[in-house]
Image: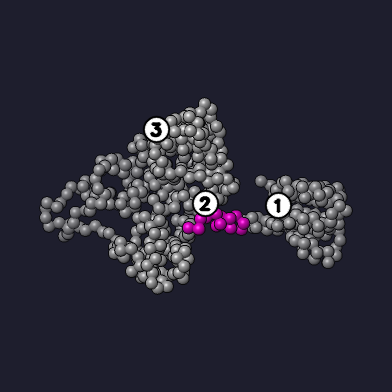
Amino acid sequence: MATRLLVVDDELDTCELMQATLERLGYAVTFTTSASAALDKVAAEEFDVVLTDLGMAEMDGLSLCERILGTRPDMPIIVVTGEAVLDRAIAALRAGAYDFITKPADPALLAHSVARAVQNRRLTQEVKRLREAAGARSADMVGESSAMRRVYDLIDRVAESDTSLLIHGETGTGKELIARAVHARSRRKNGPFVALNCAAVPAALLESELFGHAKGAFTDAKNKRTGLLLQANGGTLLLDEIGELPLEMQPKLLRALQERKVRPVGADTEVPYDARIITATNRDLEYEVFQKRFREDLFYRINVVKLDLPPLRDRGGDVLKLAQHFLGKFSSGAGKEVLTLSESAAEKLMGYQWPGNVRELENCMERAVALARFDHVTVEDLPEKIRAYKAGRFVVSADDPSEVVTLDEVERRYILRVLTIVGGNKVQASAMLGLDRRTLYRKLERYEGKKPSEELPAIES
């Protein structure tokens, strides 16, 4: 989009000359001979730079500058005047003008001044965008690991669109926090954020919960109810644990997403809605599609952009940043001095695998604050399973021939063990095992019902 400039001068010839000069440089130029009209234009339209004369009959350039900056403090204003007087230039700059040049404006000087003002405007907007992005993150979205930087980058890139977003991550990784951050960064941020956990609502009530119902639609429907899709109008609807959605509900949701309309239970007409849909799951939906437990067409409808949220064990030093964040949060709530981690406690936290992810770490730090006797958290303040944790390993031995098993059984136990280590993430497991995902799916079908905790037989030389 071309950079837009607004020229304000009560002399029409000057406006036309500046318009011709600036348009040759590639700018889109609008001009007006009235200061009051300029104020209306700035209020109604988006401009990158304003260039104004200083001495105008209706309202002088200093007053115009102050009025514009009162509502648009980020707007660069260049004062262009025939009064080459130092005190007038100083007055213009004190009023907030970005630059001051004299008439007749030298084309090269004018081009240089406008280019600098445009660059300043863009830098200011970028700083503002980054501050908003940081402010839009939940207080608990702490961490600067490379894995989380990729998450923050994707949030920034998808927030402004209405594209369907699927957030995938293990239980406890903070999928709802991510959804709220996307909503807070979007143009819908002033609208409602509505969340539904598909696993927490009985299957018989899900349709009414999502689409609403008419009065008398069923025995207990004594009043009309607005469904969550309509409640989220102008905002965002998060369908958490979408993988738990009953199969019979999936075509109904698919139609609502495709048509952007809902038919409340017992109603005769469809009602349009305007909400962005974000879904979240800890399941591998591709595997669910492969197993015929999730509709393929619904999967592609919700999986336009996928955000993979990393488990805590893959976030490196973020563990300690989050731990310190939670210590501050809970120690403040408990009326204690803000605690820190002892070196030995930090080592234990870093060595643990965190199967419960951020939620487990938060619980751990709340417990530590409650038990801490000093101004720092010690190993003794941590849960027993973290204090006693040691990285698991396979033992290989075999003096007894009866302990020897087939190669297929060794493979089965190893695959299931890898799945346990990665928290059931089949995408990550297939990458670690060097298997195509469909090959892994077929093997898992054969293993169904077998316990993943079984260890390899010990084999020693």
Classify mark 3: residues with Cα within 10 Å, few (<14), some (14-19) or many (20+).
Answer: few
Label 2 and label 1: CA atoms lie apart by: 28 Å
For image coordinates 84% across by 54% down, the residue present is 59
Q: Is residue 65 left or right of residue 427?
A: right
Which of the image's four quarters has the C terminus? Answer: bottom left
Mark 1 vs mark 3, foreground winner is 3
For image coordinates 46% across by 35% down, the residue present is 208
Label 1 and label 3: CA atoms lie apart by: 53 Å
For image coordinates 27% across by 52% down, the residue present is 417
Local secondary structure at mark 2: helix
Disc 1, disc 3: CB below 8 Å?
A: no
Mark 2 vs mark 1, foreground winner is 2
Q: Which range is magenta?
A: 127-140
Q: Is residue 38 left or right of residue 239?
A: right
Q: Is residue 11 visible?
A: yes
- Residue type at numbered disc 2: Ala
Residue at the disc numbered 2: 181
- Say which label, 3 or 2, has the lower sequence index: 2
Residue at the disc numbered 1: 48
